[in-house]
Amino acid sequence: MTDVLLTHAYFLRFDPKEYRAMMPYPPLGTLIAGAMLRLDGWSVALHDVLLSQSEAEIQPAIERHRPQIVLIYDDQFNYLTKMCLGRMRDAAFRMSEFARARGCRVVVFSSDAADHVDRYLDHSAEVVICGEAEQTLRELVPVLRGRSSTPLADVAGIAFRDGATTVRTAQRRVLEHLDVLPPPAWDLLDVAAYRDRWTTRHGRYSVNLVTTRGCPFHCNWCAKPIYGQVYHSHSPRRIVDEMERVRDLLGAQHVWFADDIFGLSPGWTAEFADEVTRRNVRMPFKCLSRADLLLRGETVADLSRAGCETVWIGAESGSQRILDAMEKGTTVRQIEVATAALRAAGIRIGFFLQYGYTGETDEEIDMTLELVRRCLPDEIGVSVSYPLPGTRFYDSIRDRLGPKQQWTESADLDPMIPGARSPEFYRALHAVTHKRHQIFKGLDTANRMANGRSGIVRADLRQIAKAAFHALTYWQASWSLQRARGRIR
């Protein structure tokens, strides 16, 4: 018999775009929660659904482990779980119902559950954890296992039902000193399943880590139901410990730092680079930053020293008016300068782009396309403004929302605002943006080769071939965009 069976609700199989990409990162937050429960002496098992085929697979796991508590604990460090996708909500509901039918006590922790407590309580959850969860679990599990006389109402950071009434307890303060947390319980994971998929598809094995929690910036479309507006960091030494562990224990060859913002604290990135160098734990990694932060002091040089391979920037738009309306706090010029600085340091650049913010015009869409052409990042990710509860963006349009208020999968691209342009328009714009990007990358590669600025390598030939394909198919995407331009949702 097991005290707690951990699982989560992000199924790669249910997210077609991500399934095709096949870049599976394990539920890091779930593994940290498992390690925390073990510190208190609880027996823990993991049913990892990320590579599963259906929700029903939890049933044999319950039969095998016979848990007292099933804890559906979503990884809040993965942006895909923070998108609160409808298909994953349905999966959480089904697993809750399977577990409750077998006599388990069901606890749920996720951004979506924090936003929609009653829906989860209506679907067999006994307790929903609201806010940061590790310390809450340390108080909650003894109560549910009958080893503490503390009333549920006195456990901060939860919601539950008392009869027909939903009770929300006091808010729990977030941790400030993150190094007190244990390392993730990697031994719970089927590491070989992840490593095989990574090496087969991408030639190397990438593992996710986090250096921080939270984000202090005020982008008004960004939901922060767990950590709020605060920001706390692990020490550089602790992060290098983690890198050493995943390299030696798991065989990791690359790291994705899944922070909202990497290296925000002044001096942190320099200390991190020093520690990586001193201990010879340099591994290629990718991270997310902001254009303005990359222009501080020696930040780009320090990232390069530490082994940074790719930085993703939340560029969002080529229109300064849209950036200001989003309360992004960055400028188009900063995006351009930061991109040039990263490229000069040999670091790859990724742009997150966001179309469909309220009031965006055709001219502003063209500004974003032009920004991509001028900066020519190595990678782009294209999305549509997505109104998540708890954001100022959501509050500004909530009275206009229709019956659909949640994306089904990460490639949904439905603006969900009556009167906005149609999903077909944004799907066509998505295709046009990607095809233009690949065409211009191919032209740049051909120009460099023609001018003798680079030798002929296989990757360059692939890029030129890819550009040729997208040039041949661009007319169809452009025609679809023009046809959908006048449609509204």
Image (spheres, rainbow, N blue to C red):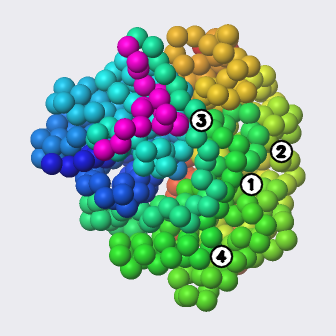
Identify the residue position indicated by label 3 in the image: 171
What is the secondary structure assignment of the residue under circle 3? loop
Identify the residue position indicated by label 2 in the image: 329
Q: In this rendering, would 297 be left or right of 368?
A: right
Q: CA distance from mark 1 to mark 4?
A: 18 Å
Would you say the residues marked 2 and 3 are in contact, meaning their CB atoms lie under 8 Å apart?
no
What number is the disc on residue 290?
1
Comes first in the chain, label 2 or label 3: 3
Q: Nearer the viewer, mark 2 or mark 4?
A: 4
How many callouts does the rendering have?
Answer: 4
Q: Residue at x 84, y 66 (%)?
A: 296
Would you say the residues marked 1 and 4 are in contact, meaning their CB atoms lie under 8 Å apart?
no
> What's the residue type where badge 4 is placed?
Phe
Q: CA distance from mark 2 to mark 3?
A: 29 Å
What number is the disc on residue 213?
none
Q: CA distance from mark 4 to mark 3?
A: 33 Å
Q: Nearer the viewer, mark 1 or mark 3?
A: 3
- Residues packed near mark 1 inside 10 Å, few (<14), some (14 to 19) or many (20 plus): many
Residue projecting furthest to the front: 149
Is residue 110 located in the magenta-colored stretch of the structure?
Answer: no
Q: Residue at x 42, y 32 (%)?
A: 151
Span colored in magenta: 147-163
Q: Position of residue 266 (x, y in %)?
A: 79, 67
> What's the residue type where badge 1 is placed?
Arg
Would you say the residues marked 1 and 2 are in contact, meaning their CB atoms lie under 8 Å apart?
yes
Comes first in the chain, label 1 or label 3: 3
